[in-house]
Image: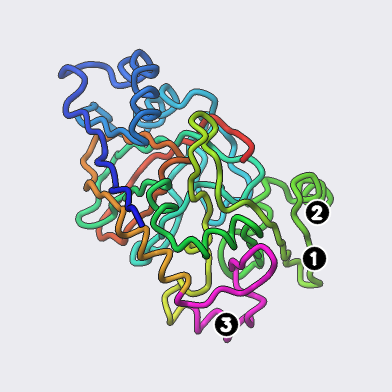
Amino acid sequence: MTRLQAQPLVRLDAAPAPGTDAVAWASGHRAELRDLVARHGAVLVRGLDLDGRERAVETVGAVLGEGMTEREGFAPRDPYGAPGVYSSSHWPADQPMCMHHELSYAARAPRLLAFACVTPPASGGVTALADARAVLNDLPPELVEAFERHGWRLTRHYNPFIGIGWQDAFGSSDRAEVDRHCAEHNIETRWGADGSLRTTQTRPAVLAHPDTGERCWFNQIAFLNEWTMAPEVHAFLTAEFGPEGLPFNTFRGDGTPLDRATVDLINEVYERHTVREPWQRGDLLLVDNVRTAHSREPYRGEREIVVGLGEPFTP
């Protein structure tokens, strides 16, 4: 099998002149930056003067284009006022967020992601990237064929004890409104007597890029699967809530469970095509969310990254 090598991240060192206003620079160069993202899958601007969260939020908003309100998030975020601009997900610092495409399980997903570094971690915490075309090409053909034929299925259990509550995920505390949203977006719902909510949705695992038509491995099959959880976390959640009560799990689209070997294989292929660049204060990273998967690696120390979701589309 021919393997496509991971393309290096395009990096612009000290792109703006010293003392240049970051917001004005980002706004003025948005078209150029978007063109670089389209050609390379991601671009890192190094050298912006992002002196605090407020400036980072404004800079992300300036470069983002049409901001997108997050719905169905799997981890809490803090909204920062500007459309589509948030904190990074609240996720344990010692646990990785494996490779995935943002909101690839939802009916609407962002095409463009923007990340601005306010405070880099003392160690770790890289937002790593992987080329979704290369990953698809390197996966076993029989695995790809099964997921292309059936899609992938995500089950979620929203409960008051762990993870994000359904009220935050759907932006409403009205059950009827949540049911309407889910019915409109082909999500099955089941309410529990204790106020919990279980949902099931099936989505395509392979997507043609909206601009180029190139086939991309576009999903969160491995990240949101039970076998990617730390063993002690998996054991605790299963003992506490049962196999059906895990906060999330993934299957083949026809309901076939995934074994650990399959999930490990997908993550191993991601790793072969992963590129990493440690964060520096003032970094601005733009990512094509269809062509490029991303992850967040464990870290130590303070870490503040402002995140933007932009250019919504229907996968």
What residue sits 37% from the left and 38% below the top? Answer: 115
Crowding at mark 3 (Cα within 10 Å: few <14, some 14-19, many 20+): some
**Mark carried by residue 175:** 2
* Colour theme: rainbow
Whether residues under marks 3 and 2 lie with C-beta atoms below 8 angstroms apart, the answer is no
The residue that mark 1 highlights is 191
Comparing 153 with 178, the one in front is: 153
Q: CA distance from mark 2 to mark 1?
A: 9 Å
Mark 1 crowdedness (10 Å alpha carbons): few <14, some 14-19, many ≥20? some
Label located before the other in sequence (3 or 2): 2
Rounded to the nearest angstrom, the CA distance separating label 3 from label 2 is 27 Å
Residue positioned 48% across, 38% down in the render: 214
Instruction: Please tell me the numbered disc located at residue 238.
Output: 3
Foreground pick, 94 / 29: 29
Check residue 249 for magenta coloring: yes
Looking at the image, do the residues carrying marks 2 and 1 touch, with CB atoms under 8 Å apart?
yes
In the rendered image, residue 208 lying in the magenta stretch gets the answer no
Which residue is outermost to the right? 176
Q: Is residue 248 visible?
A: no
Residue at the (48%, 60%) spot, across then down: 141
Bounds of the magenta segment:
234-261
Q: Which amino acid type is shown beneath numbered disc 1?
A: Trp
Identify the mark at residue 284; answer none if there is no mark.
none
Query: Would you place residue 311 above or below residue 139 in this image?
Result: above
Residues 128 and 210: in front is: 210
Left or right for 272, reference 214: left
Q: Secondary structure at mark 1?
A: strand
Q: Is residue 192 visible?
A: yes
